[in-house]
Amino acid sequence: MTVLPILKSATLAAVLFASTAVFASAKDVTISVWSGGSGPNDNYRTDAFDIAADILEREAAIRGQQLNIIVQKTPYSGWEDFKQALTLAAEAKKAPNIVATGHEDIGPWAQAGLIVPVENFIDLDSWPISDIYPNLMEITSFNGTVYGIPQDAESRPFFFWKPYMKAIGYSEADIEALPAKVEKGEYTLKNVLEDAKKMQDKGLVQTGYGFYPRNSNGPDYWQFYTSFGGVMEEEGKLVFDKAAMKRTYQYFADLVKAGVTKKNHIGMPGDQWWKEVATGKAGIWHGGTWHYARLVNQEGLKDFFTNVQFTLVPAGEGGKSNTLTHPLAYLLMAGHTDEETRIAADLIKIASEPRINALHAIKSAHLGISPSETKVDLYAADRWASEATERLLPHANAMPNNADFGKYWTIMWKNLEASWTGAKTVDAAVNDAETELKSTLGAAIIIR
Amino acid sequence: MRTSRALGLVMIAPAAVMIFLFFLMPVVLTAIFAMTNMSTATGISGGAWQVTQTAVNRLKAEMPELAGGIAEPRFVIDEEGLAALEALKLKAGFGTELRTSHMGEVFPSRREAERMIKALKDRPSTREVKQISDLFNRSVLNTRFETRDQLMASLKKLGFTLTPAEQETVAATTYTGWVWTTENFRIIRNSPDMAQIFLNTAFYVSVTLLLFNVSYALFLAITTHYMPASTASVFRAIWLLPRITPVVIYVLMWKWLTWDSGFISMFMGQFGYPPKNYLLDSANNAWFFVILINGFIGASMGMLVFSSAIKAIPQTQFHASEVDGASRWQQVRHIILPQLRWPILFVTCYQTLSLLASFNEILLSTRGGPGRATEVWSLAAYHTALNNYTGNLEYGLGAAMALVLVVVGIVLSLIYLRIFRYDTLISKPLIED
């Protein structure tokens, strides 16, 4: 009598167990992807994984495995909140599998063990990784280990509103020759100030709109430091070139003094900034290649090339013209099973294939990551991508991957902001920066 | 007696637990964090031991021999690795081929070793290539060791027997996690910016407190006291609006007022002034609005407390003074203010602490700008520890800043209790003796 019920439940248990086994072979894997700084044009940073997952599932099916990948996408439009959320989630062991972030995060995150080297999971000699520009792979390495796969490239040009340039005496030919003059160092940041002033004096733009820089902190400001002869890192050590930094701070103070840039420019609403540069309220400004996408797609500047000229960041005293590339990279976060991370790595590899990456590059006006990507029709047919690649990318340098760079950056920025707004004199700002760098970074930074 | 005392303890236990968990523990944890150099780069949960290129560079000065020996990655095809490979039970062909064709080969990088492994006739998968190359890794460079002993054991295997003192140096140089330090307080003391932020905070708290949270609140309470009841309640309700409006919306309305395309700009445009961002135009402007934004919220709290305290004053005192021919000002001076000492102490003390600690209105309106002009201590602590553009979250330094705030708060409270003679306020009235 008692044997039967036991037998019954045992059978039931066995059936249940067997059924789970069947389900288990049809594997469900959830891969979460976060991305920072992703506006409406950057959706392929995460959407690429839908396509990659589909391909990987099909490949698995052909091998006779049933793989079901659920991609959870979390794009963040800004940086502050994204980095806060991601760092704290990772500390709480709730990190996503994949994250697309600026390459400068690799240093601190690798040291903290928040990310695992991508080279442990991906064969770097295999296509399409082997095809990625070597300097980009260099940018996503830290301590000789490849931690990330470049997700995009870009560079940061100066923009000139052509009608106003003509109004202050530049001929069509002069404007066409401007990029070459900037590259050779014949047109400098000093000329930028003068031309901006001329535009204002002629009443073409309002006071404070002659030169209209980025309205918030960004890698862009390191370009000016480079223009004035500064170096960010040498042989693995950060460098604070006091004279170059002083010239940089002085330049922005001079811009404000001349009235061509607003004293309270930093912190102005972003939407307003975009609207103004797209409608010709500003004479000269700077930004990134991706600005093209926003100006054309969201801000309605349809005839970009008739209205806007773009060049490298002009040289200043003691430096040369330059631009900065700030590639985002796909990183693998720690704290997941080996198998999940392997699938995540496979997905990154597929998402880095030329045709898929070109979707992001062209939609968001970033630059491609590999030579073969430039041959994809979508990319090759895009005027902006090809011109920007040719004019800017060969001159691009990048911020260093250094675990202490963030500290340096924060100190550099807050003193630039202080001297810009007049809260400190230029001398005080540079000295304060030096004092604080010495006390916080000590021997990790060369001060000269 | 004893049981009632025990009962008292039981009754207070839940509150005591709450106080411990939500008031005391955060302070204790802040103090603990403040004594560390925790940041994004060190992580919170502890670190590992990793011989990075940077660590090798640092070791060069003190232990050149060791630094030279571990500076290069090395992959060696040897018996030990082959034995480990057999234990993995992958395809037998891998081991056989490695033994016959590659025995004793040395590769200067992982990538080169893996290129050889990849080319084995049995074609290992990427996963297997990684597994196999790990077995032949004969260097410690870039390997993450979870414990110090593992690192030391690996160094020993490489032929470096270190004295305890040397082990200490190597461990300290290669440790990636946080360490105990008092450095944060030194940074706070020496940084010129911290001094500026401290002054900002003192200015912000004292001006908002004096002008709005106490004076203006008193003014509102007294004027509404002399109004007909229905008018008074309308006025009080209006002054409560800033407090009951969600802070995001409340600050957004201020932004609409002050932006380039906002109301003030539009209004001034009628008189030919070009539009400008009045909120962030200058440090003075920013302070003006920051203090108004906070003051309007703070005033309502004082108004409520003072109004009810004035209500509690027996009407007879007012009637009697009127009979004696006292003016309104004399009533305020001799009846209301003396009896408001206790609520004023409370409001001053409470609002000082809340102004010191609250930064949400500033964060939402100026974000501390322009040029960090309105950056107050609590906001700076938040920016340092939890939210900044570069993502370099310095938990240790931020906690130390928060701890300074706790200490300042306690000191100020003690001073207030002294100034308002708290002891006389709580002593029994002489009349009942």
Image (cartoon, coloured by chain):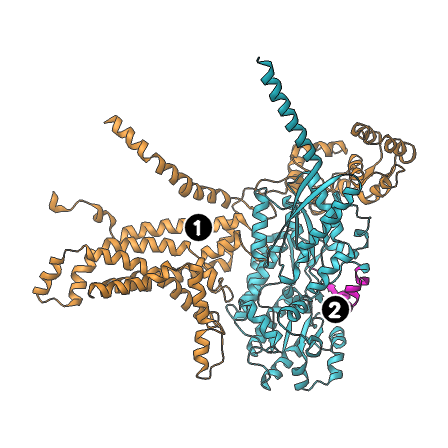
Chain colours: A cyan, B orange
Measured Cα–Cα span from mark 2 to mark 1? 50 Å
A387 part of magenta stretch: yes
Q: In this picture, is B91 found above or below A314?
A: above
Q: Type of residue at label 1?
A: Val
Q: Which mark is residue A388?
A: 2
User: Is residue A143 visible to the viewer in this orientation of the structure?
Assistant: no
Please tell me which residue lies in front, A351 or A391: A351
Q: Residue at x 71, y 31 (%)?
A: B153
Instruction: Give the residue furthest to the right.
Output: B101
Q: Can you say which quadrant of the picture contains the C terminus of chain A?
A: bottom right
Is disc 1 on the same chain as disc 2?
no
Q: Chain of mark 2?
A: A
Please tell me which residue lies in front, B219 or B34: B219
Q: Which mark is residue A439?
A: none
Instruction: Give how far across and how far down residue B309 sits, in percent.
Output: 22, 55
A444 part of magenta stretch: no
Residue mark closest to the camera, 2 vs 1: 2
Badge 1 marks a residue whose secondary structure is helix
Badge 2 marks a residue whose secondary structure is helix
Q: Where are the magenta residues, as a range?
A: A373-398
Quickly name the residue at label 1.
B404
